[in-house]
Amino acid sequence: MQKKQSILWLTSSYPRYEQDSASIFLRYLAESIDHKVFDLHILSPDDQYVDNSLYSPTIFLHYFKYFIPRRLQKLAYRSGILPNLKANPFLYIQVPFFLLYQFVSCYRLVKKLKPALIHAHWVFPQGSIASLIGRLTNTPVIITAHGGDAFALQGSLLNRIKLWSLRNCSAWTSNTSATANAFLGNIAQPEIIPMGVDCQRFGSGNAQLLRSELAKGATILLFVGRLVKKKGVEDLLSAYALLSAAQKKQTQLWIIGDGSERKALEELSRELDIDNKVRFWGKLPNEQLPDYYAAADIFIAPSITDSTGDTEGQGVTLVEAMASGTAIISTDTGGISEVIEHDHTGILALPQAPLELKAAIIRLF
């Protein structure tokens, strides 16, 4: 029997425990690989919440520690590296250690496993590290751009590093053309491969589990995602506050997710006097989301381009909502227009325009 080959993934985020939703799209992808042919090894940052509940006989999880004590390792996960740095500048101290130990750990695994290829998720820093190790060890490298690595992390030096990484890998992919086109320079064109979801799973949610206690005829507006600036939830709250008293009476706004902006958003809902109509559910296990999508009447993703230039590369939650059959409102930014066709599979408003979001909500009412 022929020995299975190994694939090594390098990533800055991966679910840390069974119900974790951190970069859940990577777990979907990992579990869909043909494990009769390949063993998949995944190297991701260590975290205090990592446990052994994700054990699999064909998916091997490796973690690199980058700071001590362990509880201070807070650069990755939660809101994401860039929002984490903005919220806590102390974390910049951890950046060089993060890069060094990711490189060392990846190099050691490549020498030990001799993988058929390295697949780096996000162009920087993972793609840069993978391309360098690929050249040192003569290992093929694939890099996948997800969005934040394209739209954010700008600067002449960083752009040169990212372009070097893409020129020195064997191939690269991007979730949308918008993400790919954000890399300016003379580089080969990528394969456009969007991140997918389990359509059967998201199409089989049980709406009655959540709607049974609601008033008859209530309309549920739903947001799912990290509570960070680029998600535009501030605009969603402002748009909801613009609805008439009668419209607010027949609706509820559900916000699922957590992040660095949560406290500010909760305070804004009180200032707008809508806190009795807005429910912050916090971070929920991904396996429960199909029921929330099924219970909702309208899914709203009001994404914007934030002050760092970061925006939505694709928007996996949009695909989840589509698979659930839930009506969608989003904004025309980043790669969203490649996922949602305006007036056909959803309504696209201008970003940072609460009045347009309000009009779209009323139109779907």
Image (cartoon, helix red, strand yellow):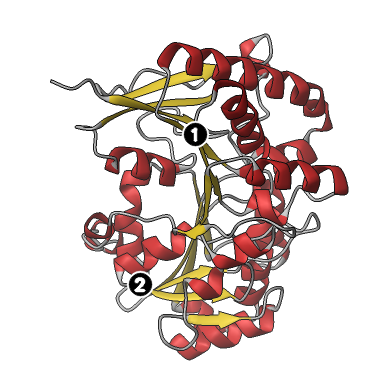
Residue lying furthest left in this view?
1
Assess disc 1: are there few (<14), some (14-19) or many (≥20) residues with their C-alpha within 10 Å of its C-alpha.
some
Q: Residue at x 65, y 53 (%)?
A: 266
Q: Is residue 32 visible?
A: yes
Q: Which residue is mark 2?
A: 326
Q: Position of residue 59 (x, y in %)?
A: 32, 26
* Quadrant location, the C terminus: bottom left
* Residue appearing at x 64%, y 40% in the figure: 168
Identify the residue shown where x is 66% and y is 55%: 187
Q: Secondary structure at mark 1?
A: loop
Residue 48, x across and y down, in percent: 54, 18
Outermost residue on the right side: it is 156
Residue 105 x/y as whole percent: 57, 16
Can the viewer see residue 312 in this picture? no
Q: Residues within 10 Å of mark 2 (few under 14, many from 20)?
A: many
Question: Which quadrant of the structure image shows residue 134?
Answer: top right
Q: Hey, what amino acid is under mark 1?
A: Pro
103 or 358, which is in the foreground?
103
Judge whether 109 appears above or below 265 on screen.
above
Front one among 261 and 133: 133
- Identify which amino acid the numbered label 2 is placed on: Thr
Residue assigned mark 1 = 140
| Identity of the residue drawn at 54% across and 12% down | 108
Q: Nearer the viewer, residue 59 or 132?
A: 132
Foreground label between 2 and 1: 1
Whether residue 154 sits left or right of residue 275 in the image: it is right
Asked which quadrant contains residue 291, the reply is bottom left
Q: Quadrant of the N terminus?
A: top left
Q: Are marks 2 and 1 in contact (CB under 8 Å)?
A: no
- Mark 2 to mark 1 CA distance (whole Å): 41 Å
Is residue 53 shown left or right of residue 181?
left
